[in-house]
Amino acid sequence: MTSVQEEAGLAATTEIREGEYGEKVAVIEPGGAEFIPLHERHGKPLNLFWTWMSPNFEFATVFVGVLAIAAFGETFSQAVAAIVLGTVLGSITHAALSARGPEYGVPQMILSRISFGYWGNALPSGINALVAGIGWFAVNSVSGALALGTLIHLNKYASLVIIVVVQIVVALYGHNLVHLFEKVVFPLLVISFGLGAIWTFSKAHYSGTPQVPFTQGGIGGFTLTLGATFGYACGWNPYASDYTRYMAPGSDRKRTGWWAGFGVALSCIALEILGAASATVTGAGGLAGPAPFVHPYPTVVKDLVLLSIAVGAIAANALNIYSGAISFTALGIKIPLTLRRALVAGVFGIAGFVLAAVGLNHISEYENFLLIIAYWIGPWLAVYFVDQWLNKGNHAAVLYDHKYTNWAGPIAMATGMAVSIPLFANQYPKYIAVLANRHPAIGDLTFEVGFAVAALVYLALYNTGLGPKRQAAASG
């Protein structure tokens, strides 16, 4: 175990989180995106399994599978292949990112400063704060509210208020309550969706090609499904070390990465395949929300699944608000309050509620949001992993160094997005990029191209004056 002297030595280069927290649950977690003191470390790798399983037991995950059949025109077997491949890719990166948390003791968007510099990291941190704390929050709140309203026959706006209040409270209290909540609801979610799956898979049609409005399946539908499933799985990547940073530095890296990645992979693959099977039963009506999805079920099972969709939305959004707030504090904006993270979480929750209320009648827009996630995370991951390959060693000293720069990171990420989105994005019917319009059979290759371009640009700039740079006074 690291000594008190070693922890004190970190103070010269690290912002250490203030306040006492430990393993308390009924206490609001202090601080924001600071280093977690060594005497406050706790938790085991196995805990990450339900922390990452529970948030995916919700209608949003099911909806990804529905899209593969009802929107992208894939056959069931094609959909399953794309779901497995896209999810496994996003889960592997999630495992690798989670494994670094115990060693560094900081959130994911603080670790991102190694690849982007202190101020250059505002690009991924800012995007993630908006996407996680407001965008994802709104999407999941809508499905949760619709499920709750259907279950208890309550006005959908009143249902939305209930869902949002519970989500904000869990996120407001912070890390320990989030982990506990995911563990407590895990059995309910697994049993409920498992019972629903019995009826869905028994009624599904596994052969034939669906008729959809804008794609004929095949390669185009496959790449669209691949992008959506990867986008959903890797949508958790920018949060990865947020939930492992409280673990002791000596925690087993392989087990930490395995349980985090396996939790994402197993839950996403299971629920998305369930959604694909559901779409062969409900057809395009599966796009309308939770009600068509549960329609084939007996009353008791229907009610259990509707309850679980509402609870699953809370499980997902507890993470979204929590990590969105952390990403905002990682921007480097000084908020001189002990409860800065909690304050930001509350503000994000209110903003997300407003967006959810506006979009309560437009759940079909979800497919575009899924693809947009992969548009920015692909280039971000490329920079992060290429930098980790080139820039080996422990870099704790630069994480809170205001003078540390690495402009190659934001330039590479921005270039990857600037090249891939205008050429390959396929957001039918609102926006179809140049090459995607001329060659519709390719579907959507934005993530793949964005990743490749960002990686190549970062490699080219790494050893130039735009690469990692620290002033001598900041070294040590």
Image (tube, rainbow, N blue to C red):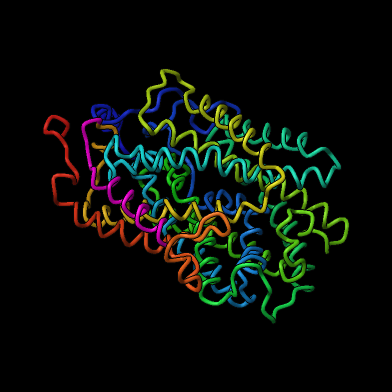
Where does the image place residue 174, in percent across and percent down from the top left? Answer: 54, 33
Look at 56% across and 67% down and name the residue there: 83
Question: In the drawing, does residue 23 fall left or right of residue 141?
Answer: left
Would residue 66 be seen by someone viewing this image from the given angle? yes
Tell me the quarter of the image containing the C terminus: top left
Q: Is residue 418 magenta?
A: yes
Tell me the quarter of the image containing the N terminus: top left
Where does the image place residue 85, in percent across and percent down from the top left? Answer: 50, 69
Q: Is residue 3 magenta?
A: no
38 and 169: which one is in front? 169
What is the magenta range? 402-423
Where does the image place residue 276, in percent across and percent down from the top left? Answer: 66, 68
Question: In the drawing, does residue 52 fall left or right of residue 419?
Answer: right
51 and 346: which one is in front? 346
**Number of numbered discs visible in the structure rendering:** 0
Q: Quadrant of residue 152?
A: top right
41 and 346: which one is in front? 346
Look at 77% across and 62% down and name the residue there: 196
Q: Is residue 357 above or below residue 381?
A: above
- Secondary structure mostly seen in magenta is helix
Question: In the drawing, does residue 47 fall left or right of residue 40?
Answer: right
Question: In the drawing, does residue 410 fall left or right of residue 67?
Answer: left
Q: Is residue 361 above or below residue 223?
A: above
Q: Quadrant of residue 64?
A: bottom right
Q: Is residue 66 above or below residue 418?
A: below
Look at 30% across and 45% down and name the residue there: 410
